Image: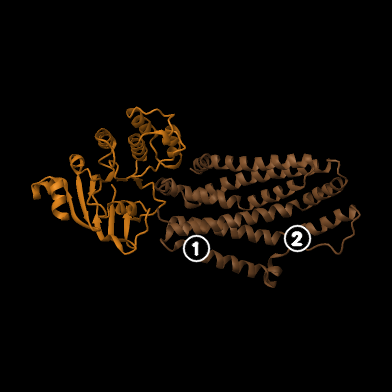
Chain colours: A orange, B brown
């Protein structure tokens, strides 16, 4: 089981506070929706968990060890941006991932790419945005890390791609062993897949709850809760 | 893991390397054409090619590191759970191998051009160029070492400043430049001191002055007392250790302070 805890995590960019003394204990597994308005600190939170940003103060611990750049075997980060190497083909990207990520499940990556009906000799730079997003997700999921941080994987995608990405996620995520943090503005589409919800507002956690408990408590859809707590 | 990183760096830098080699090859063709015509302008182009190799690693290494951020792949690169020294040295190593290949090509073309100059029929060139070629050959180990150390130094300073830029916005670049300038100044002060000479200028690996004097005497040219151009084992060892220390510093920065 994975333990992911944040203690007084603070991150500032110049005079702007992205995360303000955040204390959190994440569930051991399942899908956690990290939602909030633009600039609420969602991406910063995920990057700090993966050791890709240096916290101003406070700490992030994964299984008791401080989060750090070189702990990519514990926490995988999927960027909203085109973060794949454009000069590689899909096949070369898989081979590269298999070469650099310990425990990379090549069979799963191949299965996912086959399901996506992508030709493995296509160059990444020639893929559509939706297909790049699919490849990114396949490679990230095949890393089989205890923590997956998916930063806006649905952003800018058409409904078919969004549905495809969410389907792949719930089909292939090991919900008993893996903890998946996912940020998105597509709250309505995301809601049915979530086990837990974090709502961030101005760098603070304003809601930290299991989805079922939240529904029971507030008696309204997640998007309405989001509007209510961030106004 | 390390092999996969090297392969990725090689593939990624290959188009850049091909462009640099293409530009250099155009220059080398120019040198050879001028050599066949007996036009000494080719020597100037040769000097420019040497100058380009002085900044070869600066260009290749800077573009290799900066390229991760420019193409937004820093999220992928920094999330690779490899020790930072592997991420850093894969980039530095590939650039250095390409540098060696390019220097080898330049050396081959250079000596070929000198041989062509010697055979143009011009009596002055027929006399001067073989001597020039022999002199270059005699001094080659020293010249190659100096060029390589300077190129590595420039490249490492550039990578240090770049990583400082990625560590602290917005002043990291300026702080890095100031720190690098202070370190270079201190190094020059130290390397000119009597302490440095007594500690590190020992065990002569290569006496360029003596070789040059011997060569000139063989050609009947009278020279004064030779010496003064040495390659010391102690000095070379120190420089290699300093390079290793800088690479360790860059690796530490990547793990501890660089932000994606």
Residue B257 shows in the view: no
Q: CA distance from mark 2 to mark 1?
A: 33 Å
Do marks 2 and 1 share a chain? yes
| Location of residue A177 by image quarter | top left
Which chain contains the residue that carries disc 2? B
For the residue labelled by badge 2, is the local secondary structure a helix, a strand or a loop? strand
Query: What is the x, y in percent for residue A46?
Result: 31, 51
Identify the disc placed on residue B99: none
Residue at image x 75%, y 51%?
A: B140
For the residue labelled by badge 1, is the local secondary structure a helix, a strand or a loop? helix
Residue at image x 51%, y 49%?
A: B63
Query: What is the x, y in percent for residue A96?
Result: 45, 38
- Along the horizontal axis of the image, is A211 left or right of A110? left
Query: What is the x, y in percent for residue A5?
Result: 28, 55
Crowding at dot 1, Cα within 10 Å, few <14 / some 14-19 / many 20+, comes out as many
- Along the horizontal axis of the image, is B38 left or right of A56? right
Which residue is under mark 2? Answer: B230
Towards the viewer: B125 or A52? B125
Query: What is the x, y in percent for residue B26?
Result: 65, 40
Depth check, mark 2 against mark 1: the one in front is 1
Which residue is under mark 1? Answer: B176
Upstream in the sequence, badge 2 or badge 1?
1
Vertically, is B106 above or below A52? above
């Amino acid at each position: 089981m994975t333990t992911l805890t944040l203690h007084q995590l603070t991150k500032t960019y110049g005079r702007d506070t992205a995360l303000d003394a955040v204390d959190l204990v994440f569930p051991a597994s399942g899908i956690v929706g990290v939602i909030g308005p633009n600039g609420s600190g969602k991406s910063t939170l995920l990057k700090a968990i993966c050791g890709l940003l240096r916290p101003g103060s406070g700490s992030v611990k994964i299984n008791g060890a401080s989060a750090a750049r070189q702990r990519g075997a514990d926490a995988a980060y999927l960027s909203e941006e085109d973060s794949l190497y454009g000069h590689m083909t899909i096949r070369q990207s898989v081979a590269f991932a298999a070469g650099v990520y310990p425990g990379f499940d090549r069979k799963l990556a191949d299965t996912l790419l086959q399901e996506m009906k992508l030709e493995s000799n296509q160059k990444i730079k020639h893929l559509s945005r939706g297909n790049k997003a699919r490849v990114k997700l396949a490679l990230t999921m095949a890393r089989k890390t205890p923590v997956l941080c998916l930063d806006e994987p649905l952003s800018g995608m058409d409904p078919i791609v969004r549905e495809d990405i969410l389907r792949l996620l719930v089909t292939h995520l090991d919900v008993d062993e893996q903890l998946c943090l996912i940020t998105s503005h597509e709250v309505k589409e995301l809601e049915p897949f979530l086990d837990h919800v974090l709502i961030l507002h101005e760098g603070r956690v304003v809601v930290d709850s299991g989805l079922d408990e939240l529904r029971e408590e507030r008696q309204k859809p997640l998007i309405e809760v989001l509007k209510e707590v961030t106004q | 893991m390390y092999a996969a990183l090297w392969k990725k760096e090689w593939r990624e830098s290959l188009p850049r390397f091909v462009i640099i080699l293409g530009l250099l090859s155009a220059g080398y063709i120019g040198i050879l054409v001028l050599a066949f015509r007996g036009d000494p302008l080719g020597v100037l182009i040769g000097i420019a090619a040497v100058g380009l190799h002085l900044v070869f690693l600066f260009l290749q290494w800077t573009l290799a590191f900066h390229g991760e951020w420019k193409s937004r792949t820093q999220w992928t690169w920094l999330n690779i759970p490899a020790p930072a020294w592997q991420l850093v040295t894969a980039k530095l190593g590939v650039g250095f191998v390409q540098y060696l290949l390019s220097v080898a090509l330049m050396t081959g073309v250079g000596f070929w051009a000198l041989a062509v100059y010697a055979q143009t029929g011009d009596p002055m060139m027929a006399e001067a160029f073989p001597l020039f070629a022999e002199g270059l050959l005699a001094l080659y180990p020293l010249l190659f070492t100096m060029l390589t150390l300077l190129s590595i130094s420039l490249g490492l300073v550039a990578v240090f400043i770049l990583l400082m830029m990625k560590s602290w916005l917005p002043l990291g670049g300026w702080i890095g430049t100031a720190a690098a300038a202070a370190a270079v100044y201190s190094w020059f002060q130290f390397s000119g001191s009597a302490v440095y000479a007594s500690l590190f200028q020992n065990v002569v690996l290569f006496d360029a002055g003596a070789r040059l004097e011997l060569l000139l005497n063989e050609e009947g040219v009278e020279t004064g007392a030779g010496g003064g151009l040495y390659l010391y084992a102690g000095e070379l060892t120190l420089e290699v250790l300093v390079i290793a220390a800088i690479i360790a510093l860059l690796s530490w920065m990547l793990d501890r302070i660089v932000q994606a």
